């Protein structure tokens, strides 16, 4: 998933978010083993976690690391969170362009000359946003010296070195405290220190609780201001202000992308209880792929990439509708079709005889097929050359037969010398219809097409007499308005009957 996401990306976001995503598993074991308990601060049963780095504006995973205790400490990081952060940033470093001109010529890993590089999707080293689990003084120093930028919350016991706690906001709000629920407009305490090649800025302020945000190379100023919030409608609409500063605003703008993805993971509903613990991470990975696919669908539907891909807001599929359509496509597709890269390596294809494999891939070898953009352009209203499936009509056209004597047209009641051999009346005889006539009175008439048109059902001369029981002498040729009204009526009948 991560590899494919990076492969189709031209340029990644310069702001990245790091957070963990959790997959739950309720295993089996003896009483008191804790297998059916809960992970701390998580609403899932015990299972596992994966740390993901994603674009901040959209869920686009760029790197990941599975969370366990067997990772070797990088750059002297002894804590799990900072060590995971360093591992992810080292992975991102391989995707940063070193020079616009020679980026394509560089083909070696910066830390391992024998390892090939990945696709260069970052123009510069990104800014990383994370919570206090991933930050301490040591990792901030590593980030600054290696040319990255970062912003995140800091725990009360890991404040910047050299600053006494009495000068920062460190008191913990008590549960049920009414004062903590009130807005507290206090100028933030800003500490700035310039190190060798980078600048670290620490922001401490009092919100509903004591808050500390630390930054590296990403904050130019920090002032206090007020943001307006509103709720309700009409007479019940209310406004209020909340305290805000530049450090807090930047953090709140960047930290949420993976939390939103976790919410969509839950809505994917890919979970079932089983003793096979490996099913839980597998289903978690499938759900991540669905969330990513829907995010790409939304981005393409905005029309910023290609105009022909734009989807109107009313026609946009919801996450649940997209999930159902995707499921149907996945269940109906077979690798034998060999329409996508990698199908030829699937077991169901490699186990086939070579002749059978060649037959299945014949369509693929014939050349390119029509794209969605080309189809939309051809079906554009007003200039469309496509009128929907005409296979049934073509079948009727292929059964047109001539008659040696004149017959009465079933649509207009005039004489005709052609019949539709596919259609039969109550006596089993073919239906007489004008088909591209060249006579003076009937030239250009569309009797054959009107007779086979759903919108015109019941408007023909024979239909008025045999179906509706009206007199043939009272019939008159329907105009455009009559056909339009009848089409609406037929459409409503079809919808009600589910035809």
Image (tube, rainbow, N blue to C red):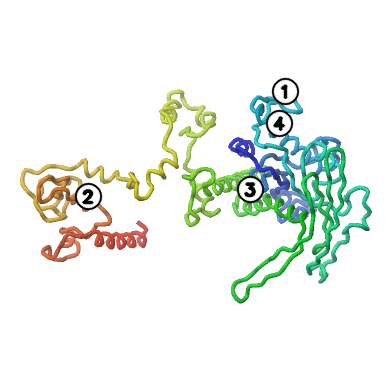
Q: Residue 58 carries which label?
A: 3
Relative to residue 370, is residue 382 depicted above or below?
below
Sooner in the amino-acid sequence: mark 1 or mark 4: 4
User: How far across and how far down the image is residue 100, in percent?
Assistant: 66, 31
User: How far across and how far down the image is residue 240, in percent?
Assistant: 71, 69
How far is disc 2 from disc 3 in space, using C-alphas? 51 Å
Q: Which mark is residue 98?
A: 4
Of circles 3 and 4, which is in front?
Answer: 4
The residue depicted at 85 percent of the width and 39 percent of the height is: 77
How far is disc 1 from disc 3 in space, using C-alphas? 33 Å
Relative to residue 139, is residue 497 depicted above or below?
below
Disc 1 secondary structure class: loop
Quarter that holds the C terminus: bottom left
The residue to which callout 2 is attached is 449
Disc 3 secondary structure class: loop
Describe residue 169's horizontal placement relative to residue 437 as left or right: right
Q: Residue 114 carries which label?
A: 1
How far is disc 2 from disc 4 in space, using C-alphas? 66 Å
The crowding category of the residue bearing disc 2, from other C-alpha atoms within 10 Å (few below 14, some 14 to 19, many at least 20), is some
Sooner in the amino-acid sequence: mark 2 or mark 3: 3
User: How far across and how far down the image is residue 48, in percent?
Assistant: 73, 46
Sooner in the amino-acid sequence: mark 2 or mark 4: 4
């Amino acid at each position: 998933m991560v590899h494919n996401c990076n492969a189709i990306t031209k340029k990644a976001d310069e702001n990245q978010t790091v957070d963990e995503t959790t997959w739950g598993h309720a295993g089996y074991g003896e009483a008191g083993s804790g297998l059916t308990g809960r992970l701390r601060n998580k609403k899932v049963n015990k299972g596992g976690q994966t740390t993901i780095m994603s674009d901040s504006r959209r869920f686009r995973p760029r790197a990941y690391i599975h969370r366990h205790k067997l990772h070797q400490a990088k750059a002297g990081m002894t804590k799990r969170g900072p060590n995971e952060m360093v591992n992810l940033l080292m992975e991102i470093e391989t995707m940063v362009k070193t020079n616009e001109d020679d980026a394509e010529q560089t083909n070696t890993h910066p830390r391992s000359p024998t390892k090939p590089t990945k696709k260069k999707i970052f123009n510069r080293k990104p800014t990383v946003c994370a919570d206090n689990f991933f930050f301490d003084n040591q990792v901030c120093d590593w980030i600054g010296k290696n040319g990255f930028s970062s912003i995140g919350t800091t725990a009360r016991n890991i404040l910047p070195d050299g600053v006494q706690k009495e000068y920062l906001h460190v008191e913990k709000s008590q549960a049920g405290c009414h004062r903590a629920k009130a807005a507290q407009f206090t100028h933030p305490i800003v500490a700035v220190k310039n190190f060798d090649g980078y600048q670290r800025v620490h922001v401490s302020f009092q919100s509903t609780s004591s808050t500390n945000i630390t930054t590296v190379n990403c904050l130019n100023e920090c002032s206090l201001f007020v943001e307006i919030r509103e709720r309700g409608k009409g007479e019940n609409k209310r406004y209020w202000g909340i305290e805000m500063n530049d450090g807090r605003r930047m953090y709140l703008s960047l930290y949420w992308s993976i939390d939103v993805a976790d919410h969509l993971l839950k809505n994917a509903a890919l979970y079932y209880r089983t003793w096979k613990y490996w099913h839980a991470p597998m289903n978690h990975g499938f759900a991540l792929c669905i969330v990513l696919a829907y995010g790409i669908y939304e981005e393409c539907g905005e029309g910023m990439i290609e105009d022909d891909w734009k989807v109107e807001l009313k026609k946009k599929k919801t996450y649940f509708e997209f999930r159902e359509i995707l499921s149907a496509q996945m269940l109906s597709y077979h690798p034998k079709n060999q329409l996508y890269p990698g199908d030829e390596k699937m077991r169901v294809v490699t186990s086939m005889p070579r002749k059978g494999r060649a037959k299945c891939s014949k369509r693929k070898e014939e050349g390119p097929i029509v794209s969605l953009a080309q189809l939309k352009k051809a079906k554009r209203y007003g200039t469309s050359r496509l009128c929907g499936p005409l296979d049934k009509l073509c079948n009727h056209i292929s059964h047109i037969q001539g008659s040696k004597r004149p017959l009465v047209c079933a649509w207009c009641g005039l004489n005709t010398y052609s019949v539709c051999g596919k259609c039969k009346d109550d006596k089993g005889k073919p239906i007489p219809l004008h088909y591209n006539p060249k006579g003076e009175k009937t030239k250009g008439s569309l009797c054959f097409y009107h007779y086979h048109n759903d919108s015109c059902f019941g408007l023909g001369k024979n239909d008025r007499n045999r179906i509706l029981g009206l007199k043939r002498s009272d019939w008159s040729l329907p105009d455009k308005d009559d056909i339009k009204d009848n089409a609406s009526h037929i459409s409503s009948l079809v919808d009600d009957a589910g035809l």
